[in-house]
Image (spheres, grey):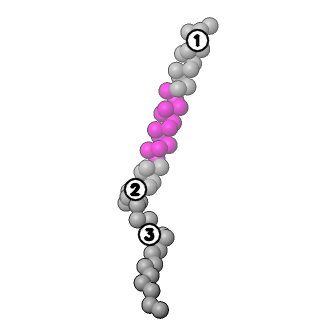
């Protein structure tokens, strides 16, 4: 029996775009930190307004 088998390496990541992963990580941390800072100061202002 001669079967046509197409073996692919699972490490090839066919759907992954070639990007700079370190830059993505830094931007994610900075973005989340900025969002949390805005939420924090918003809640502090809300606290002072409700007292």
Residue bearing mark 2: 20
Which comes before the other along the chain, label 2 or label 3? 3
Counting other residues with Cα less than 10 Å from the Cα at mark 2, is it few (<14), some (14-19), or many (20 or more)? few
Residue at 44% x, 82% y is: 5
Q: Which residues are magenta?
A: 26-38
Badge number at residue 12: 3
Q: 9 or 1: which is nearer to us?
A: 1
Residue at 46% x, 38% y is: 31
Residue at 42% x, 51% y is: 23
Q: Is residue 22 left or right of residue 43?
A: left
- Circles 2, 3 touching at the beta carbon (< 8 Å): no
Which comes before the other along the chain, label 2 or label 1? 2
Q: Is residue 34 magenta?
A: yes
- Circles 1, 3 touching at the beta carbon (< 8 Å): no
Q: CA–CA distance between discs 2 and 1?
A: 42 Å
Is the residue 44 above or below the residue 14 in the image?
above
Is the residue 9 above or below the residue 32 in the image?
below
Which comes before the other along the chain, label 1 or label 3? 3
Q: 3 or 39: which is nearer to us?
A: 3
Q: Which residue extends farthest right? A: 51
Badge number at residue 1: none
Residue at 53% x, 31% y is: 36
Q: Is residue 49 magenta?
A: no
Residue 27 % position (x, y): 44, 44
Residue bearing mark 1: 48
Quarter of image, res 8: bottom left
Q: 37 or 18: which is nearer to us?
A: 18
Q: Which residue extends farthest left? A: 18
């Amino acid at each position: 029996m001669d079967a046509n088998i197409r073996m692919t390496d699972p490490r090839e990541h066919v759907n992954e775009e070639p990007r700079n992963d370190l830059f993505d990580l830094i931007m994610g941390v900075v973005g989340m930190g900025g969002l949390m800072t805005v939420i924090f100061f918003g809640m502090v202002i809300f606290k002072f307004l409700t007292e």
